[in-house]
Image (cartoon, helix red, strand yellow):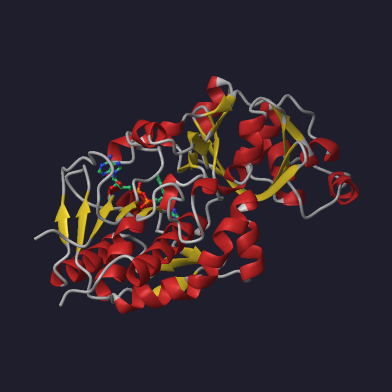
Amino acid sequence: MRENVQIVGAGPAGLICADIISAAGISVHIVDHMRQPGRKFLLAGRGGLNLTHSEPLEKFLSRYGAARTFLEPMIRGFSPEDIRSWCLGLGVETYTGSSGRIFPTAMKSSPLLRALLRRLNERGVRLSAKTQWQGFDAIPTIFAMGGASWPELGSDASWMSTFRNADINVNDFQPSNCRVKFLWSPHFATRFQGQPLKNIGLRHGSSHSKGELIITRDGLEGGAIYNLSHAMREQPTRDLHIDLKPALNADAIAKRLSQPRGKMSEANFLRKALGLTPPAIALLREAGRKVDAQHIKDVILKPQGLAGLKRAISSAGGVALSELDEHCQLRKMPFNYCIGEMLDWEAPTGGYLLQACFSTAVAAARHVIKNHAKPLP
Ligand SMILES: Cc1cc2nc3c(=O)[nH]c(=O)nc-3n(C[C@H](O)[C@H](O)[C@H](O)COP(=O)(O)OP(=O)(O)OC[C@H]3O[C@@H](n4cnc5c(N)ncnc54)[C@H](O)[C@@H]3O)c2cc1C
């Protein structure tokens, strides 16, 4: 017997969609070309699995930039609180971290993925692994084939040409939330790779960000620079300005630096007077700057460009939002939906990525249930 609804892609978007549709008693067939479902979701779990964020919804929605208008009704329809309840329904408790980010208590994806797959299996949802999508079909289909980062985990964007041949506008994929490359001296790279720069401010053109960075062998990564993804993609080699002490103005810093240093080394003095860490001091020196108040507030670095799509946390680009109605249904091909990261929206890290994947999936699922699929007799 053929199922009533087909879902292509067993990532978080495809799987929650299958969960909602099968809960309404509708038969679902999921296909995925990987050997196992949820490979990228499992990788996301290695960093703790930031499911969503607890900040006020108005602020939350602002994270989606130009895509807010499209996503807002769906996020209101399946909100951060709804994600928590859904997880709880699967036996997975969540908690809010000090930054406001929401994680599963176990800080990984596997318990949630296992519980979800078990429930789908109990409901008779068929999952065909190692099955490549072949082309548009006659039954209601929900595409959840992901973006284009970490292609070896499944989302390899191999579907793009088929979509474009069907006259669906798909924007090229580009890296988002990715490392930015800098040409470090061998000493700085070797001595400080892996070390954090905490509570710093960043400016790139007129875009600002705050938070934490990690020094890598050939660049910088972490939330503070990911927030600037969009701006840095536009002007990848424009100077990056780092404020090592955003909580103090230059006068306050100068006052602390004017205290007698005594026999302390410069590094020790800076640590005591300002709380500057060794990597922060080394970054100042790496930028060839004199250690004074002005430069502590404005370390200027020359980026060498963004690291590629392959190791980005997410991607911008994908199916143009103008191709979709408010239920994520393709305007040119009713009965066909696109959800999750394969759509052209982007957001910083902080749980906003999974939230949009889940919310678009639920919106499509509800519309399919209402309009295109009959429950099993
Ligand atoms: C290192 C890392 C850490 C991350 N951490 C977080 C985090 O903490 N919080 C957060 O919100 N987000 C995080 N993300 C992002 C998040 O994992 C993705 O946004 C999310 O997985 C996208 O879900 P999706 O279902 O749209 O696509 P995917 O998870 O990419 O799933 C797509 C599925 O479609 C299948 N597929 C693709 N093409 C075909 C085809 N032609 N035929 C059949 N099957 C196909 C793939 O095999 C895959 O299983 C992280 C990402 C990375 C790389």
Seen at 26% across and 60% down, the residue is 110
Number of numbered discs present? 0
Residue 265 placed where, x, y %? 71, 37
Q: Residue furthest left?
A: 1
Check the picture and name the quadrant holding the N terminus. bottom left
Q: Residue 70 occupies which quadrant of the picture?
A: bottom right
Seen at 66% across and 64% down, the residue is 59
Residue 274, placed above or below residue 233: below
Residue 312 visible in the current orientation: yes
Residue 62, placed above or below residue 197: below
Seen at 84% across and 44% down, the residue is 257
Residue in the foreground of this view, choosing between 327 and 274: 327
Residue in the foreground of this view, choosing between 142 and 67: 142
Residue 373, placed above or below residue 158: below
Residue 123 placed where, x, y %? 16, 72
Q: Is residue 178 left or right of residue 118?
A: right
Residue 236 placed where, x, y %? 63, 28
Residue 357 placed where, x, y %? 43, 57
Q: Is residue 122 left or right of residue 240?
A: left
Q: Is residue 11 left or right of residue 188?
A: left
Seen at 29% across and 60% down, the residue is 15
Residue in the foreground of this view, choosing between 364 and 88: 364
Residue 93 visible in the current orientation: no
